[in-house]
Image (cartoon, rainbow, N blue to C red):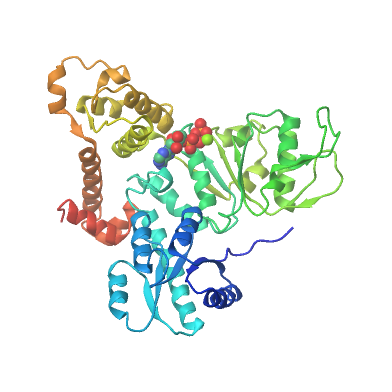
Amino acid sequence: MGRYGIMKPKILIIDDEPEFLHVLKSYFSYSGYEVTTALTAEDGLRFIEQTFFDAVVTDMAMPRGRSGLELLKEIRQTDGIMPVIIMTGVGTIESAVEAIQMGAFHYITKPFDPQELEILVRRATESGRMHRKLIQTGVTEEENGLIAGNNRQINTILQTIDKVADSDAPVLFLGETGTGKSLFARRVHDKSIRRGRPFLTIDCAALAETLLESELFGHVKGSFTGAVSAKRGLLEEAQGGTVFLDEIGEIPPGTQVKLLRTIQEKEIKPVGGNHSIRIDVRFVSATSRNLEEEIEKGHFREDLYFRLAVIPLRMPPLRERREDLPQFIAHFVNVYNKRYKKKVSRIDPKVMQMLNSSFWKGNIRELENAIERAVLLAEGETITGDLFGYQTQGFAGDDREYHSLPLKEIVEEAEKQAIQQVLAETEGNRTEAAKKLGIGRRTLYDKMAAYTLK
Ligand SMILES: Nc1ncnc2c1ncn2[C@@H]1O[C@H](COP(=O)(O)OP(=O)(O)OP(=O)(O)O)[C@@H](O)[C@H]1O
Ligand SMILES: [Mg+2]
């Protein structure tokens, strides 16, 4: 089995001249890039829709289809960061300047030495990665539908994930049901150099011992009743990627021993087989149980716990991050508006109060389900209490529209308050405040300006 080192940066080069493309492709492949080429902007766009590129290099003037500038414009509509380098012929400096104004990373004038382009590309891929990291810790991050929010614990967790993602350190998520453990587990993978490899999940609570082991390690034909043919285990299928062991607290003692050995020796032995297979996977696990208690009761091996919990991350329950409720509500309203073709845009403040004082035993999942139902049942543009089964008598029907608040305002208000509070705590030290909020200084300045805070 191959070993997977650092993931190569992926670049896309677009030019209408096949020979020129060929030269660049050889040069960059040799320099350690994963190179895709396209002869037209249209073909390039198709690749961009399918794969993530660290940088795009495009010719400015192409005889067929869109120009490099038009391509840049197109890319910027959906991706504000992906660095685009424009290759221009002599005498098109003006459009090169225009390209920079439109958000190109740089331009280079033909003819050039491939080495010159490589310097630009290297800088571009590095800056792109940095930039994405900064943005991803922003207050209202919605990439992959993940709301970061203003809660300090969650922001620390996000920062930790960024820090450890590229290492192979096992991460263990602890926390009540519905707090986002599975979503964040996936994020560890997506942020890591393994992101182009498989991410496979196994729900340890759902399978009996024999099946669980054959799922994990695979089995040889006839190794147990029902094993009519050989099967590759999940740990082998995930080669080079990440295995997410969900509900790890439910794993039977026998399997715990085998798993421990697997992690230590980086090898698996299929059930009923006598040969070993080397594996290269990253382990992420999650549990809603109190593992310390389980260890004390002798239900969970302490040595396995230490192996899995090199980076333990404790997801706070929703009731301990109420400051994020408005953002979650707005997010889920958007999601379900789209899904059910609804136009909900306001919320009865009384409902807001009730949602705010709920206990949320099922955490974010329970909130999501409640919002889904309310959006589905809503007839107008306002979410009212009856949609949650709340009694909001005393709120006359006709007054509702008038009293209801636009979601956007609710979110902005929450954000504004969080920023104000942290600025007060840090006595106006913006660097410190940005750090506490888990956002970049620039983002903080922008938001302070937007909310006219000083
Ligand atoms: N930060 C977040 N932003 C947006 N949605 C979230 C966030 N956290 C959780 N959710 C959503 O809440 C629901 C529950 O999250 P998830 O399934 O990750 O929780 P869990 O802790 O794994 O729960 P369980 O213990 O029951 O497996 C999912 O639909 C998920 O997409
Ligand atoms: Mg889960």
**Residue 265, position in %: x, y?**
74, 52
Q: Tally the marks.
A: 0
**Residue 165, position in %: x, y?**
53, 55
Depth order, front residue of 169/208: 208
Q: Residue furthest front?
A: 64
- In the displayed structure, 179 sits above or below 169; it is above
Quarter holding the N terminus is bottom right
- In the displayed structure, 438 sits above or below 122; it is above
User: Which residue appears at 65% of the width and 61% of the height?
Assistant: 4
- In the displayed structure, 73 sits above or below 50; it is below
**Residue 385, position in %: x, y?**
26, 20
**Residue 130, position in %: x, y?**
42, 64
- In the displayed structure, 79 sits above or below 62; it is above
User: Which residue appears at 42% of the width and 82% of the height?
Assistant: 110
User: Which residue appears at 38% of the width and 68% of the height?
Assistant: 68
Quarter holding the C terminus is bottom left
Depth order, front residue of 308/162: 162
Depth order, front residue of 146/71: 71
User: Which residue appears at 46% of the width and 38% of the height?
Assistant: 180
Asked if residue 303 lies left or right of residue 20, the reply is right
Asked if residue 280 lies left or right of residue 45, the reply is right
Depth order, front residue of 56/421: 56
Residue 363 visible at all: yes
Residue 80 visible at all: no
